[in-house]
Amino acid sequence: MRREHGGPTPTRLMSTLKKTLLQQGMKLMSDPRVVKLMQDERVMKAVMAAMSMPGKAQSFAREQAENIAKAMALATEGEVRDLQRTVRKLEEELARIRADQVATGNAKKKSGDAR
């Protein structure tokens, strides 16, 4: 999909689409036939199930990607984040130990100089 100079950005396009859908939804909700239909418990259950589908699909896709990664012995995104966090903590601890060693070395030099 090629964008012409000055054309709408994907974000602006989605915003416009959301506004249009919201306006159409509000028009529908003011229709007495739709109001009556929405009072039916079966319809509401179907609507709620439809609204939860994107989240379920995303969760399913994420789980399948993790299963494939494990089967191929690859690190998942979460595992990489955990490893990065561990490395960062270890680097901080190493820097602290080195700083303590430098301070201890300086203190020994000063006490040796005083003799």
Image: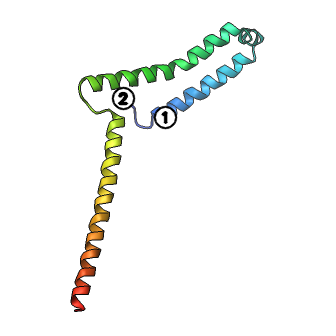
Specify the quadrant of the image occupied by residue 64: top left
For label 2, count other residues whose C-alpha is less than 10 Å away and answer few (under 14), some (14-19) or many (20+): few
Q: Residue at x 33, y 52 (%)?
A: 88
Local secondary structure at mark 1: helix
Q: Type of residue at label 1? A: Thr
Q: Residue furthest right?
A: 32
Q: Residue furthest front?
A: 115
Of residues 26 and 36, the one drawn nearer to the viewer in this rendering: 36
Q: Type of residue at label 2? A: Arg
Relative placement, left or right, of 81 versus 54 is: left
The x, y position of residue 63, in whole percent, is 39, 23
In the rendered image, which quarter contains the C terminus? bottom left
Q: Cβ–Cβ below 8 Å for labels 1 and 2? A: no
The x, y position of residue 30, in whole percent, is 75, 18
Q: Residue at x 56, y 15 (%)?
A: 50
For marks 1 and 2, the one nearer the N-term is: 2
Relative placement, left or right, of 76 versus 51 is: left
In the rendered image, which quarter contains the N terminus? top left
Of residues 34 and 86, the one drawn nearer to the viewer in this rendering: 86
Residue bearing mark 2: 2
- Residue 36 appearing in the image: yes
Residue 52, above or below 43: below
Of residues 64 and 90, the one drawn nearer to the viewer in this rendering: 90
Residue 107, above or below 82: below
Rounded to the nearest whole Å, what is the CA distance between mark 1 and mark 2? 15 Å
Q: Residue at x 32, y 46 (%)?
A: 84
For label 1, count other residues whose C-alpha is less than 10 Å away and answer few (under 14), some (14-19) or many (20+): few
Specify the quadrant of the image occupied by residue 49: top right
- Residue 8 appearing in the image: no
Which disc is residue 11 wearing?
1
Local secondary structure at mark 2: loop
